[in-house]
Image (cartoon, helix red, strand yellow):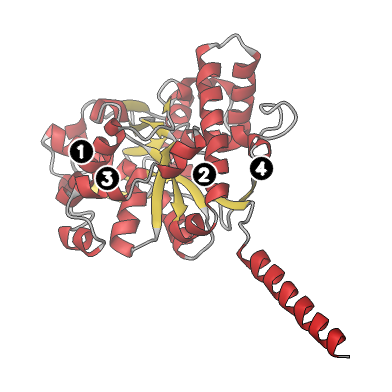
């Protein structure tokens, strides 16, 4: 009887240990946030495509399962960061501006772990606008006040010597911008691709300035991760980035070879993702640089970016210090974490 009792105790302890291990086991599932029809973030769709991976998705290839996060795709990066804060998103692709702004102003517990692209936005205006100063007294739409598109508008106004207060800036859902321009409810909008090329090719508007004109080779969309998720599921984060890097490299090779079957597949994926036709997608790709690396240039740009956000009063020095950053350079060194990407590339 004593032996049976002792054996039972051992079995219970073993089961408890097993259950404890199971409770702390890393997940293979990742809930992914991304923006509505944002061609900057098409790497996510490429990595999910089984044809790209010769029968399996790149995520499956590296042993990770992905699913769209609650509410995705989002109308703007600020909304995505709110879903990070609500615990809905594990990893997300979004603009670097809302990633910084919401982290600093609202304390959203994320960190940037890779790039998605450089440049790729533009200021589109109605046909009667010929220079930036013509927008004085007019209305211009942006996706949100935390979006990089608003930041670019502020930069352009400063560059052109126009007080932003003399322009009415409003937030409009990205999908409604072209309609608002056609209805003359706005005289211009700043948007990501393919909404820029869509408006231009349709004849609704014209490009007054690309984002590359405003800030050459500026950082744009990034990959961010919830820090708690990353701490508990580091291998899933690395696996996600392996797929992201391979997808980015695949896209860049396809874009270099427009006669290849890979290029045709990329166009098809982009058309399905954005809901735009072939001509719009091909034109839009011309304004985007796809890049995953975290390099000194990116960190330097992020530092400059943060200091500009302070200058434009989108974030404050007090909030920056409250989050543990002395200045833009300090944020670029601490908030941008290359650890997972380094492992993904090994």
Nearer-the-camera pick, 217 or 184: 217
- Look at mark 2 in the image and give the residue it sits on: 36
Q: Marks 3 and 1: CB-CB under 8 Å? A: no
Nearer-the-camera pick, 343 or 111: 343
Q: What is the crowding at mark 2: few (fewer than 14 residues within 10 Å), some, or many (at least 20)?
A: some
Nearer-the-camera pick, 18 or 137: 18
**64 lies above or below 7:** above
**191 lies above or below 27:** above
In this picture, residue 170 sits left or right of residue 286: left
- Look at mark 3 in the image and give the residue it sits on: 332
Q: Distance between the Cα atoms at labels 4 and 3?
A: 30 Å
- Look at mark 1 in the image and give the residue it sits on: 155
- Look at mark 4 in the image and give the residue it sits on: 63
Q: What is the crowding at mark 1: few (fewer than 14 residues within 10 Å), some, or many (at least 20)?
A: some
Give the label, 3 or 1, closer to the camera. Answer: 3
- Whether residue 289 is visible, yes or no, is yes
Mark 1 lies on a secondary structure that is: helix
Q: What is the crowding at mark 3: few (fewer than 14 residues within 10 Å), some, or many (at least 20)?
A: many
- Whether residue 145 is visible, yes or no, is no
The numbered mark, 2 or 3, whose residue comes first in the sequence reads 2
Image location of residue 18, percent across then percent down: 71, 68
Q: Distance between the Cα atoms at labels 2 and 3?
A: 27 Å
The numbered mark, 1 or 4, whose residue comes first in the sequence reads 4
The numbered mark, 3 or 1, whose residue comes first in the sequence reads 1
Image location of residue 208, percent across then percent down: 29, 27
Q: Distance between the Cα atoms at labels 2 and 4?
A: 26 Å
The numbered mark, 4 or 3, whose residue comes first in the sequence reads 4
């Amino acid at each position: 009887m004593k032996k049976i009792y002792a054996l039972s105790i051992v079995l219970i302890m073993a089961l408890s240990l097993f259950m404890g291990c199971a409770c702390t086991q890393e997940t293979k599932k990742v809930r992914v946030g991304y923006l509505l029809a944002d061609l900057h973030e098409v790497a996510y769709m490429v990595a999910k495509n089984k044809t790209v991976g010769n029968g399996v998705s790149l995520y499956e290839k590296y042993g990770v399962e992905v699913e769209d996060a609650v509410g995705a795709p989002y109308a703007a990066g600020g909304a995505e960061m709110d879903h990070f804060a609500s615990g809905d998103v594990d990893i997300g692709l979004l603009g670097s501006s809302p990633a910084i702004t919401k982290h600093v102003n609202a304390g959203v517990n994320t960190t940037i772990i890779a790039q998605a692209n450089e440049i790729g936005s533009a200021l589109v205006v109605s046909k009667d606008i010929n220079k930036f100063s013509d927008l004085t007294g007019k209305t211009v739409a942006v996706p949100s006040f935390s979006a990089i598109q608003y930041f670019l508008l502020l930069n352009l106004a400063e560059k052109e010597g126009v007080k932003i207060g003399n322009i009415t800036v409003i937030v409009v859902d990205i999908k409604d911008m072209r309609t608002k321009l056609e209805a003359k409810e706005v005289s211009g909008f700043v948007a990501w691709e393919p909404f820029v090329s869509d408006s231009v090719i349709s004849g609704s508007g014209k490009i007054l300035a690309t984002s590359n004109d405003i800030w050459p080779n500026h950082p744009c969309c990034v990959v961010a991760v919830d820090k708690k998720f990353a701490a508990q599921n580091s291998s899933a984060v690395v696996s996600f980035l392996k797929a992201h890097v391979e997808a980015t490299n695949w896209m860049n090779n396809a874009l270099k070879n427009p006669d290849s079957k890979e290029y045709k597949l990329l166009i098809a994926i982009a058309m399905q993702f954005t809901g735009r036709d072939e001509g719009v997608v091909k034109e839009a790709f011309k304004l985007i640089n796809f890049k995953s690396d975290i390099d000194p240039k990116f960190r330097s740009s992020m530092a400059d970016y943060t200091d500009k956000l302070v200058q434009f009063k989108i974030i404050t020095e007090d909030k920056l210090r409250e989050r543990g950053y002395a200045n833009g350079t300090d944020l670029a060194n601490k908030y941008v974490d290359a650890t997972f990407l380094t492992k993904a590339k090994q």
